[in-house]
């Protein structure tokens, strides 16, 4: 044996040509797949350690992206290949995903955090960007904080929407963003809460990308990919023009989607469980992002299954989708069932339809078209940069053909769906129209771009140039098309005052109960008034978000009009007897029939059957999942 090793070492020292490498390890290295990998040394492999073998391996080409700084070598033997016979090298490697361990995260977090903070530097000069959805999110956070103080942990009814008439906003808008906003509102001064939220969302996105990128890249390149993704051009559009905070938060799920799908395609079927958590998190964060996540997952599963000729990938992916839906059913089932009680069609009304938002589209609304030009030029920049980076990363494709093909197909589909030629797909694919804006696919394309730029553009000055061009496009849009709108501290405090004084705020058309007309309401109407000619004395004892109680002393039988939109989940009791509220024809506010004398009225927002069922489904799914994890751990312990 020693003679063979000595011969191998002598052959290695005298070898002038290329050598091949064999790796034996307990799991995949850098996502490479089989436990024994063959390939030529990749030119991007890093050889930075002061190893005595450095002089022997410096010029070796490798098909594996091996980072010698992170790869402990148990045994290295270089053997000379003679003719067609090949003697191989053996080394022990880290277990899967060891490259994203805390030591590396400590380097990445400051870099990503500083980049995210740099995005907010203009806030110190002009205030908070007042994008399209800013007031919607900030008022939601204030509403949630108010209801938490009332003891309502999971709000459903936004009581001060439509200036006090309310809407079931929190039944239909996913909870992750407004719960995070509520927590931040309880901790930080109100004027900086949105800035903290933006910084946190960008940082989470960058760190998620870092975990993904470390699968194929060394630490420096992975940090670059993380920073690039955190402050990519589309994220800047969201921050400065859109204020779509839930969509921004959902961007951190996309790298995890790709990472877990790759692991699933490599045969690690247990990855279906964490993948289901990502899918559930998508539903609980943002509906358009969840649709993109699920369509992207379906596409990736099809591509991987076709390349590997394996249906097991599709079955595992389907199981993850079902499990994710069950985990999120606490929100998802009521939102699906109760949408027949609201004007959900307003979500895809004129101006919000896909056909009104393809790239470089023209409408009758000049403000709409100006913003569309901004997103269109950003989209064209990212599309061109993505495919240029894919071409530059073609050498990496030799060792990662399956993944490179999947990224390319994903980028092609994301790009194509932004153009009018795909209008039929937007019309016929299930629920795709509820994405509203085709350019939302930039959320996925930006992640693909970040990976491919890090893989394909190896010179740092070229990377800086790529991002400089991105910033130039944003700056040109800022100066030449539409500058962002800004809210100062006084504007933000006015929102607080509107909530504390019970003035309320504008609601959202698609969450308005069926039959309600917000344009016809009386903003100054009392909480309870007599509808007819009878005389009444109203004494309100409680008027909370989901529970209201008052007494009405009536001179004759009549109806009482409440400053509250009618919704099936409201349960009305008068003198201990359940009664059916009627809608006022013009506004759909609640009308209660009362009799002469004393009427003790209780109005409560109750749990409908769909909410009860969804809670049981989520609880049962979580219990079964925990039980499965415990059983698997016990089996592994016994086997070891």
Image: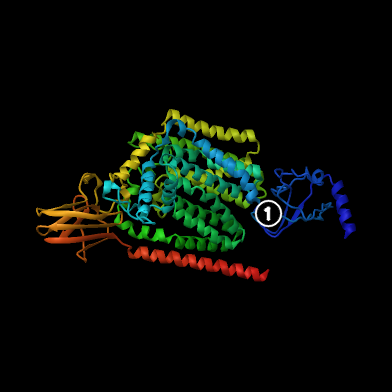
Residue 143 on image: x %, y %:
35, 49
Q: Quadrant of residue 449?
A: top right
Q: Residue at x 64, y 35 (%)?
A: 460
**One can see residue 386 in this view:** no
Residue 49 on image: x %, y %:
75, 44
Q: Residue at x 60, y 51 (%)?
A: 403
Residue 629 on image: x %, y %:
56, 66
Q: Nearer the viewer, residue 530 or 253?
A: 530
Residue 251 on image: x %, y %:
50, 47
Is 43 rendered above or below residue 329?
Answer: above
Q: Is the N terminus in the top left, top right, bottom left or bottom right quadrant? A: bottom right
**One can see residue 567 in this view:** yes
Q: Does 223 sit left or right of 93 as displayed?
A: left
Q: Does 260 sit left or right of 11 as displayed?
A: left
Is 319 rendered above or below residue 522?
Answer: below
Number of numbered tags placed on the structure image:
1
Q: Which element carries disc 1, helix, strand or loop? A: loop
The residue indicated by pointer 1 is 29
Mark 1 surroundings: few (<14), some (14-19) or many (≥20) residues within 10 A: many
Q: Does 244 sit left or right of 599 as displayed?
A: right
């Amino acid at each position: 044996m020693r003679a063979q090793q000595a011969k191998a070492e002598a052959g290695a020292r005298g070898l002038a040509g290329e050598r091949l490498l064999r790796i034996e390890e307990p799991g995949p290295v850098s996502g490479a797949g089989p436990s024994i990998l063959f390939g030529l040394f990749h030119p991007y492999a890093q050889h930075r350690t002061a190893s005595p073998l450095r002089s022997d391996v410096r010029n070796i080409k490798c098909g594996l992206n091996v980072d010698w700084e992170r790869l402990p070598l148990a045994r290295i033997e270089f053997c000379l290949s003679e003719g067609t016979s090949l003697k191989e090298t053996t080394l022990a490697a880290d277990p899967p995903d060891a490259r994203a361990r805390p030591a590396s995260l400590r380097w990445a977090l400051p870099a990503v955090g500083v980049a995210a903070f740099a995005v907010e530097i203009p806030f110190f000069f002009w205030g908070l960007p007042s994008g399209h959805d800013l007031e919607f999110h900030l008022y939601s956070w204030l509403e949630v904080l108010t209801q938490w103080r009332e003891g309502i942990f999971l709000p459903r009814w936004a009581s001060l929407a439509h200036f006090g008439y309310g809407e079931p906003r929190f039944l239909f808008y996913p909870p992750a963003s407004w719960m995070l906003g509520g927590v931040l509102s309880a901790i930080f001064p109100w004027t900086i809460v949105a800035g903290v939220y933006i910084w946190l969302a960008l940082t989470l996105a960058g760190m998620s990308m870092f975990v993904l990128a470390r699968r194929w890249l060394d630490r420096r390149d992975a940090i670059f990919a993380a920073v690039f993704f955190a402050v990519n051009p589309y994220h800047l559009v969201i921050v400065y023009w859109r204020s779509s905070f839930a969509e921004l938060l959902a961007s951190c799920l996309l790298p995890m989607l790709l990472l877990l799908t790759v692991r699933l395609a490599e045969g690690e079927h247990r990855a279906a469980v964490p993948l289901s958590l990502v899918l559930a998190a998508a539903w609980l964060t943002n509906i358009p992002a969840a649709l993109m996540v699920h369509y992207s997952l379906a596409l990736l599963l099809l591509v991987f299954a076709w390349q590997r000729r394996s249906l097991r990938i599709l079955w595992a992916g389907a199981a993850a989708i079902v499990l994710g839906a069950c985990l999120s059913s606490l929100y998802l089932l009521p939102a699906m069932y109760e949408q027949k009680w609201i004007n959900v069609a307003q979500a895809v009304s004129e101006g919000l339809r896909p056909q009104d938002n393809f790239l470089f589209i023209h409408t009758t609304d000049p403000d709409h078209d100006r913003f569309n030009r901004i997103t269109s030029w950003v989209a064209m920049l990212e599309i061109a940069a993505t495919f240029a980076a894919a071409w530059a990363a073609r050498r990496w494709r030799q060792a990662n053909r399956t993944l490179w093909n999947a990224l390319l197909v994903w980028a092609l589909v994301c790009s194509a769906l932004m153009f009018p030629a795909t209008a039929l797909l937007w019309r016929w694919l299930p629920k795709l129209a509820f994405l509203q804006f085709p350019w939302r696919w930039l959320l996925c394309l930006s992640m693909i771009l970040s990976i491919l730029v890090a893989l394909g553009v190896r010179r740092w000055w070229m990377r800086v140039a790529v991002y400089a061009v991105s910033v130039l496009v944003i700056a040109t849009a800022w100066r030449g098309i539409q500058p962002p709108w800004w809210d100062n501290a006084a504007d933000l405090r006015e929102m607080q005052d509107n909530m504390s004084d019970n003035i309320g705020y504008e609601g959202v058309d698609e969450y308005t109960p069926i039959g309600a007309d917000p344009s016809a309401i009386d903003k100054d109407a009392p909480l309870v008034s007599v509808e007819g000619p009878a005389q009444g004395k109203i004494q309100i004892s409680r008027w909370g978000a989901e529970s209201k109680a008052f007494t009405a002393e009536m001179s004759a039988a009549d109806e009482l009009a409440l400053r509250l939109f009618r919704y099936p989940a409201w349960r009305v009791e008068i003198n201990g007897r359940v009664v059916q509220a009627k809608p006022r024809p013009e506004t759909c506010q609640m009308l209660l029939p009362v009799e002469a004398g004393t009427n003790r009225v209780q109005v409560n927002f109750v749990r409908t059957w769909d909410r009860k069922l969804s809670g049981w489904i989520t609880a049962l799914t979580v219990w079964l999942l925990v039980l499965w994890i415990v059983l698997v751990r016990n089996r592994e312990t016994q086997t070891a």
